[in-house]
């Protein structure tokens, strides 16, 4: 079942990618409108996720914070609407690469008929497609310097998340409930 859901979500993202390529000229012409739409979708994604966790009584430090890397990228996309900085595009692109991995490693994905399924497809579509939107609108291109910045910030992020997981019994960045290497000791797995 999870494989079918993953393929459905992958199909949706490929369809959106195709539309983006087919209408790249319009994306450039209507840049402000496109950015407003992206902002609205990012706010809807974060709002739905937050509302869901609150409504089921599971808004906890261990589960609901935006500390998973894809959730942080979504917040960066919201910030980018206001800041319009190349360095933020670089982080969004390089950290967003983890969104691609969401379709490779086996994590539990809710169906599209569930709120969390909708938030999943919104979140990962934004993570994957936003750099392309920025390419079509402002000419964003990933750079080596941008990759270094993303790596340095990731080197700060990961240990903080590991400590936070320990304090809250959380599983941010899947450091506790691992998608693979289940029998590996914690320290080598972390590295």
Image: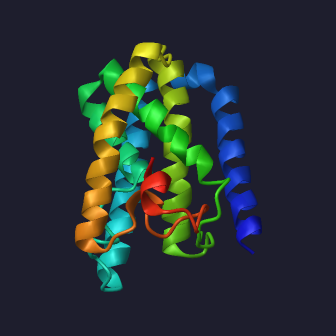
Q: How is the image coloured?
A: rainbow
Q: Is residue 29 visible?
A: no
Taking depth in this image into account, of 108 and 189 the one nearest to the observer is 189
Taking depth in this image into account, of 32 and 112 the one nearest to the observer is 112
In the displayed structure image, the side of residue 96 where residue 150 appears, left or right: left
Q: Please report the residue visible at 35 percent of the width from the left and 48 percent of the height from the top.
A: 158
Q: Please report the residue visible at 60 percent of the width from the left and 48 percent of the height from the top.
A: 101
Q: Please report the residue visible at 52 percent of the width from the left and 20 percent of the height from the top.
A: 135
Q: Position of residue 46 (x, y in %)?
A: 35, 58
Q: Position of residue 11 (x, y in %)?
A: 74, 51
Q: Position of residue 103 (x, y in %)?
A: 66, 54
Q: Position of residue 127 (x, y in %)?
A: 49, 43
Q: Please report the residue visible at 39 percent of the width from the left and 46 percent of the height from the top.
A: 74
In the displayed structure image, the side of residue 126 where residue 86 appears, left or right: left
User: For the N terminus, which image quadrant?
Assistant: bottom right
In the displayed structure image, the side of residue 186 where residue 120 appears, left or right: right
Q: How many marks?
A: 0
Quarter of the figure with residue 138: top left
Q: Residue furthest bottom?
A: 57
Residue 50, relative to residue 54: is it above or below?
above
Q: Is residue 105 visible?
A: yes
Residue 75, relative to residue 162: is it above or below?
above
Residue 13, relative to residue 66: is it above or below?
above
Quarter of the figure with residue 186: bottom left
């Amino acid at each position: 079942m999870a494989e079918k859901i993953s393929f459905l979500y992958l199909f949706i993202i490929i369809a959106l990618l195709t539309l983006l390529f087919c209408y790249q000229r319009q994306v450039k012409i209507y840049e402000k409108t496109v950015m407003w739409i992206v902002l609205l979708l990012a706010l809807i994604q974060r709002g739905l996720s937050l509302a869901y966790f609150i409504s089921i009584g599971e808004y906890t430090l261990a589960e609901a914070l935006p500390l998973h890397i894809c959730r942080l990228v979504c917040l960066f996309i919201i910030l980018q609407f206001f800041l319009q900085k190349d360095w933020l595009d670089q982080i969004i692109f390089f950290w967003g690469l983890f969104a691609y991995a969401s379709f490779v490693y086996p994590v539990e994905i809710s169906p599209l008929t569930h709120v969390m399924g909708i938030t999943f497809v919104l979140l990962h579509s934004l993570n994957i497609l936003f750099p392309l939107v920025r390419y079509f609108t402002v000419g964003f291109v990933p750079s080596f310097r941008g990759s270094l910045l993303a790596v340095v910030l990731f080197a700060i992020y990961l240990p903080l998340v590991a400590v936070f997981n320990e304090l809250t019994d959380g599983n941010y960045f899947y450091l506790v409930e691992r998608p693979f290497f289940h029998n590996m000791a914690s320290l080598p797995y972390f590295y």
